[in-house]
Every structure is written in structure tokens, then in C-alpha cells.
Amino acid sequence: MTTLTQPGAGAAMATPDASVRPVLSVEDLRAYYVLDLFGVKREVRAVDDISIRIMPNEIYGIAGESSSGKTSLIKTIAGAIQPPLTVVGGKVHFDFRGKSIDLYSGAPADLDAIRWRHLSYIMQGSMNVLNPVRRVRQAFIDFAARHIAAPSRRAFEEVVVAHLDRLHLSPHVLDAYPHELSGGMRQRVTIALATVCKPEFIIADEPTTALDVVVQKRVLAMIREVQREIGSSLLFVTHDMSVHANLCDRLGIMYAGRLVEEGATSDLFASPKHPYTQHLISSLPRIGDRTPREGLKGTPPNLADPPPGCRFHPRCPMAMEVCRTVVPPFVTAGKGRRVACFAAEPETIPDGIANATRSIAA
Amino acid sequence: MHGYGQYILKRLGQFVLVVFVGISITFFVTHLTPIDPVETTISAAAAFGSTSPEAIAMLRETLRELYGTEGNVIQQYVTFWGRILQGDFGPSLSAFPTPVSELIARALPWTIGLLVTATIIAWVLGNILGGLAGYYRSNVLLKMSGVLAMGLHPIPYYIVAFVLLILFAYVWPIFPLSGGYRMNLAPRWDATFILSVLYHSILPALSLILVGLGSWFMGMRALVSNIVTEDYVQYAELGGVNRRRILSRYVMRNALVPQMTGLAMSLGAIFNGAIITEEVFGYPGIGSLLVDAVHAGDYSLVLGITTISIVSVAAAVLIIDLAYPLLDPRVKVA
Amino acid sequence: MRVVFDLLRTNIEFAIGMFLLAIVVIVSALSFVSPYEPDLIYVVFPDMPPSAEHIMGTTSRGQDTFWRLTFAMRNTLLFGLSVAILSRILSLLIGLVSGYLGGAVDRVLMSINDTFVVIPLFPILVLFYFVMRDSMSWVGLAIIMACLGWAYDARLIRSVTMSLRTREFTQQSVFSGMTTRQIVSQEHLPYVMPIVFSTTMNNMNWSIGLEVTLSVLGFTNINTPTIGTMIYWANQHTALVAGVWWWILFPVLMVVILFIGLFLLAVSMNEYIDPRSRLSRMKGAA
């Protein structure tokens, strides 16, 4: 994996508490799908210049519509990228208790050593993450046995059963094949599997998307509970803003491969600064509110050929002349808030652009 | 357990259907043609000159009953089944008066021995190599073996067997030209005889393995390159599960399920191959017996071998099908 | 047509397969300008090694090996093509009906289908020859083999049809009032046809392989020149022992060229059809 580390442009980072070191720091990360079709090179900029810091014991949410690059981002963060997705620049650094690692400069073996012990993963489409021809017990042995110091198989199984019990799961699930469990059950078993080693960092990618609402609620409660209990950080990705509202401490909004706004969840919902965030929040249903929801015109941009300037400008109701040509910088905007928008932060508009603030919105 | 019982019942039904359809085809193939095999056979037998008139009369009677010229087609069909269910094909013409069943019983162990060994070796080896080639895509040695397997696979058994015979028995005679054991040995359970049998079986087995290996190799490689993109494999990789364990327990283990179905599906073709191979190497099994029977005009023997072939292939498929739930826990509920 | 050029340019397997097949077709076509009648024997001096006059030598039966081979190749190719076309019709019919109607019809058809997949055909074909003897022509054999060799591909076509049936555009056609026959022939056939073409190659390999085997053993009409009967006659005259190696080598070489050519075409076409492998090609190129 080639690594191009650029000197930190992420100076304007906002951290809630400067005395605690973040578990994860992502700096100016860029990961593109590099395609070469019959000699024609194409780049799809799925992750473009993203910087995030996640603190211990924090739940950080990433929101955005499908194909906004959020899955590519967490794949990159989890060190799970495969060609054609390639890291073309930036840094992913984990600072675990007694062990820190730079994902795209260390040897792959180091990565295997932290997996599951320090960093675990709850995957999208969790229906199929368990090997269909082996019992659930085998999955626990394969994933966790090398990290849990137990004198015997029996002792190891006691640890696993205790953990299952804590999550209100019957030890009988160990004897089941995945197909014998319901969808919600399978997801809960996967969460148990991902947390049995008490990792310091958990990445959850749309873990509740395929579930029905009631099961979804139970699974979310379970994630929250286990996160509190083991005190790990959680990076939670979903397109569902209502889930973010209920779960996350802080929230990052992604649009077309970039972070456009970040802040504490309550602040963000109370006063969204970026027009895209405003749209996401206003489209949430509220009890008693009967006004029709306004749709966003247009479609998400093609990441192989994104629009110049602010990537949101063709769909933005507040778009100005400057948005067409200049990429708005991601700057601190109040306590713990960052935003990339000329309309929200007019002082970031560079000088010397004619008619910079003339509206272009239709 | 209820689901498993249903599965067994279904498989048994399929077994009965294969036997029924197969044997019905042999009946109609022989009865819808304008030629009366009984008289053709008798005249061929008479032309041999060595058979006594009583023997010919007895032969005609068996053949008439077996072939069934009495009554209409339905009645003939019923009589035909009666004979077959008893396993009674009457005496052989070419080895008169030895019963057909005895000739078959003598040849069958050779064929089954050769076939089972060669098929298992080809299947296991093809799956292991194909699995490795699918998982380690950039390995040059595995790529080369893939090219070799692809080149060998489409060539029919006969040609492969023939070329092997020419190369390793004529041009570079390190293996015997034909036979199942050394001519001057009496079949006995001792080391000399068994070694001789093994030595004689190497070339025929090799030809079966070479052809079979290719298709298992390619099937497995294609399956593996699909399975590595499955969620459970990616998840195990994210979980830092030991790579060798991922390859064996996650990737190959899941690919074996369709490969097992493939084995059951291609047993008929493999059997065809064994028959042909035996003829090329003069191996004393069912195949050689069949070819000799055709040349000698031995109707009852040909019919007997055809029937036995169908039943034994159907039985082998049934055995695989019954073992299948051990490999795939999902069939119990399906 | 554009597809063919595309494949020739980008797919090495397809290009090699086409090249090998072209050799075979050209050789077969040359039979039309052969200076010798196919059925005559002892028209040239027997047992001559390859020379300028007889590029593949002459056989012990006094035939020119090369020109004999052109007739043999033509018949073999025609035979394979006939079986393929006939059995394609059967598998298409059964596969589409089974996949589209589903339910009980599907279950019954598929058990019959699986039965035909499993039954060992070789003994049955031998039995057939045994009864027919020399009155069995290659046309008769082709018909029999087509009737026995449709099953494997019918299952394939069925599974494709089943997946098509559940797609949206099928539902839409149903709502727009198209009849089943219209939907199958206008909407689904275009998806199924590429599979029919690629299975044609495999089916030809299968049928020609069986024909060669039957002929070599003398279980077909041995007077029709095919690749199999050529090897049969060579064996009858113990060509190898007598040192007339060219009588065996060239037919075997020719048929191996045909098999590999057909196989490569089938493989490359499968790859072309399967969207997943298309994707992996894109990845591989990156």
C-alpha cells in the first residue's frame, strides 16, 4: 500500500477535551477507486480529504445518503480496502491502550494483531457474515480464541457464555447454525461476537438497515448497552438520521466523499449550518407536523466526475457564484463545530472573486 | 429431523426414477428399431458353429423372453421388468453357458475399484489445487497448473487414454500395455498380486484422473473466486482470523457444497469414461466386457451390462446424496 | 457482430479459440475441392510418409491422409452441430417452460431432467448400436444423442429464466397484458440466447467426444469417414506398430485442436455473459 503523508492541514480540528488523546485520528485521508479500463484511467473519489478524531468512550456517527462514500471511508478506516480502492494520501492512526498503529504505513501483520482485540467491526448485511456451514461456536473460536487468555477450551467457552449472558442471549445459540437463527438474532449474535474481546474501538456499518423497526430498536439498545459497559469508542454509520439522533454523541455529515459538517448531535440537530444537513434534518418526520417534506432536487454527483467547487452546489438552494469554483474549507464554527459552507461562514470566501455572493440557485 | 427424513425420501424417489427411466430407455431403444436382435444373435451364434442345437434352442427361448416377442408391447415391457428385477439375464452367448450375472459379478469389482479410486483422487486433488489457485491468484505455479488443467479438460477420455498408452507403453515402455495384472499370476490376496494390480492400474487411473482433475480444478477455482467476495469471508478477514483457516474452513468448505452436487451430477459421465478407458488398456472390467460382448453379438450380456451400469450409477449418486447433509447443514430445513 | 470484434480484441482465450476453430473449418471446407472421392480406397500408393505430394502421407488403405481428414472433419463437425442444434431446441423448450411455469410442472420436469443428467449414456448408445448394427447412420445417432443430451443445459436455462421471471420488467410485461408466450419469446429469449450459444460449444465437445469414442471402438457406421472411424481404421491396420504414425497423429491432433478451440470459445463466452466476471475483469485491469 503506498502512503503519501501530507503535512497536517487539519489544524482546525475541534476536540471536546484536549487533555484526552483520541483513539482514532484520521488526517486528510483520500481514498480513490482507481480504475483502468482498456487504457482509460478513471478515478472515483470516494473519500476526499477527510479528517476525524474520535475520543475514548465516544459514539461518533457518520451520516449521508447512499454512494456518499461513507462505506468506503469506514473500509479505509478499518484497513479493509482492496483494489481498486486505494489510499492516495493521508493518515489513519489508532492510539489504543499500550499500542498505537498507523494503518497505511505499518506491516499488514500488525493489523491482524489488533483486529478483534482492539478493533472490531459490525458489518453491513450482517445476515450473511456468519459462515453458513459451521456452528456459531466455531465463529467465536475463530475470531476470539487467540485474544482471550483462557487455560482451556472450556474456560474460553465460559467467558463466551458469560458475555452472551450479559447481552441476554442464551448459550444455546452457540450450537446453532446461522440459518437456524432469525435475522435479528443473527445480528445480536454478531454484536456479541464483535464485543466479546472488549475492543476499544468498534466500527458499525449500517448494522440495523435490513431489520424491521422493532428488532432495530432492540439491536440499537443492545449496541448502546454493550458500548457503555466496555467503554469502547463506536463509529456508527447509517443513512438514518433518527438513529443518529438517538445514539450518537457527535455526528459527521458526509456528502459526495467529503465531510461537510460536524458537531455534537444535539447542536447539529438544533442548529444545522450546512444546507445539506438542514435538508437531512428537515426531512425527518415529526409528530403532528403535516407540512409536506421538501425533496432535494437533482441526484448525488458522479464521484468519477464531481462538480467543481462545492460538490453540493448544483443541488443547493443557497448556492452562490463562489460555490461554483472554490471548494469551501472545512473550518471551526463555534464550540466543537466544523462546517464547509460559504453561506454558513461567509468570512471564508476568498477575496477577489467577482459577484462572489450572487445567488445562482434556481 | 423431520426435514432430513423428507430429504431422504426425495432422494430415494430420484433413485427409483433414474433406474426406471434408464431401463425404460434401454427397452424402447431395443424395441423401436426394426431389427429383431434375437434372430440376428441366433444367426451369429449359429455362424460360430460350435454351439449345439439344444443350446441354440435354449438361447432362443431366453432371448425371446428377455427381448419379449410374446404379447403386445405393454406385456413385453412387463416381462422385461420381471427379468431385470430378478437380475436374471440368462446365459451369456459368448461364454455359454455361464450366466450373464456371473460374468458381470466378476468384472464389476475391477471397474468399481478403478473408478472409485480415480474419481476420489481426481476430486480431492482438483478441489485442493483449484481452491489454492482461486485463493492465491497471483501464484505463477498455480496459474500454470490452471492452464494445463484447462488444456486437458476438454479432451475426451478416449484420446487421453490413447495418448498415455502410446507415450508410456510404446514410446517409453515403463507401464504394461494391457491387462489388470500380470498374465501368469493367479488372482489371490497376496502382496505380489496386489502390487501387480496396482502397477497395471496406474495408467488407466492416470487417464481418468487427468481428465477429471481439470474440471474439478476449474469448477473449484471459479467457486472460490466468487466465495472470497462473500460477506462471511470478508468478515473473517476483518476479524483477523488465521488466513489458512479462512481458506480451508470458510472458502473451500463452502465451495465443497456445490462441488459435491457436481460430483453426483457427473458420475454418469465419469462412468462412461471408465468404460472407455478400460477398453483402451484392456482392463478386465465392465467396459472391456461390454465391448467384447458387442463384438461377439452377445445380446443378453450387453443388456445386462447396460442395466447394471444404470443401477450402479444411480446407487452411487444416492450414496453421495445421502452424505450431502453432512457437508451442508441447510438441507435439513430446505 | 460488434461483440465478436470486441471479444477478439480484448479476450485472448476467445481469439485463440476462434483461430483453432478456423483451422478446423477451413480443413473441413477443403473437402469440397478434394481430388479424391471419399468412399474409394486404394487410389494412391499405401503407407507413404508425409511428403510434398501427400502432406500427411497415405494410409494403409491407399487413401491420402490429408484429403481423407478433410471429409472426416466435415462429417464430425456436422454431426456435432446437428446434435447441438437439436438438443438446444429441447433444452430451450424444457428450460423455459420449467423456469417460467414453476410449481408442479417445474418439479416434474426437473426430476426427469436430473434423471437424464445422471444416466450413463455410453452403455445405452452401445446397446443402440448393437440393435441397429450397420443400419445406424450418423443422422440416427445424432437424433438419439440429442434426445439424451439436453438435460444439463435445460437446468441452466431454467435457472436463468427463474431469475428473469422475478425481475421487474417481467412484472411490467404481465401488467401490460402480454401473453406468456410473448413474454418468453420477446423479453426472455434475448437473455437466454447467449447461454444457448455458449452451451452449444460444450455440447459439441460432448457429442463429438462420444462419437469419436463409439467410432474408435467400431460402434458406428465405420464406412462414413469421421475422425473416430479414421482412428478406428488406423487401429485395425495396427498403424502404430507398422510405423504408419501419421495415420493416427493427424486425426488425433485435429480433434484435439477442435476440442480446445470449442472449449476456449465456451469459456470466453461464459465470462462475457457473466456480469460478475465482467466486473472482476475491470478490477483485474486496474
Image: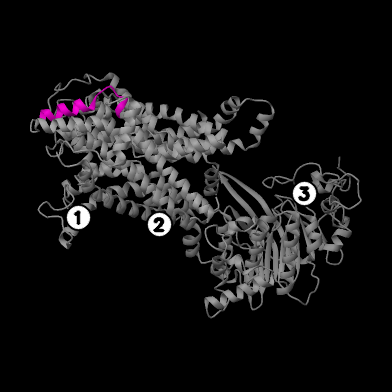
Q: Nearer the viewer, residue B206 or C65?
A: B206
Whole-number angstrom distance, CA of label 2 to CA of label 3: 53 Å
- Image quadrant of residue B74? top left
Left or right of B189, for residue A148? right
**In the rendered structure, which amino acid carries the disc numbered 1?**
Val
| SS category of the residue bearing label 2 | helix
Tag 3 residue: A309
Which residue: 23% across, 21% down? C38
- Residue B41 located within the stretch drawn in magenta: yes
| SS category of the residue bearing label 3 | loop
**In the rendered structure, which amino acid carries the disc numbered 2?**
Ile
Tag 1 residue: B197
Q: Nearer the viewer, residue C72 or A259?
A: C72
**In the rendered structure, which amino acid carries the disc numbered 3?**
Gly
Tag 2 residue: B128
x and y percent of residue C23 in the render?
A: 34, 31
Res A98 visible: yes
Is the C-beta separation of discs 2 and 3 under 8 Å?
no
x and y percent of residue B230 in the render?
A: 56, 54
Pointer 2 and pointer 3 on the same chain: no
| SS category of the residue bearing label 1 | helix
Left or right of B154, for residue B59? left
The mark lying in front, picked from 1 and 3, is 1
Which stretch appears magenta? B30-47
Which residue: 62% across, 62% down? A4
Left or right of C226, for residue A94? right
The mark lying in front, picked from 2 and 3, is 2
Prevailing secondary structure class for the magenta stretch in the rendered image: helix
Whole-number angstrom distance, CA of label 2 to CA of label 1: 27 Å
Within-10-Å neighbours for mark 3: few <14, some 14–19, many 20+: some
The first of marks 2 and 1 along the sequence is: 2
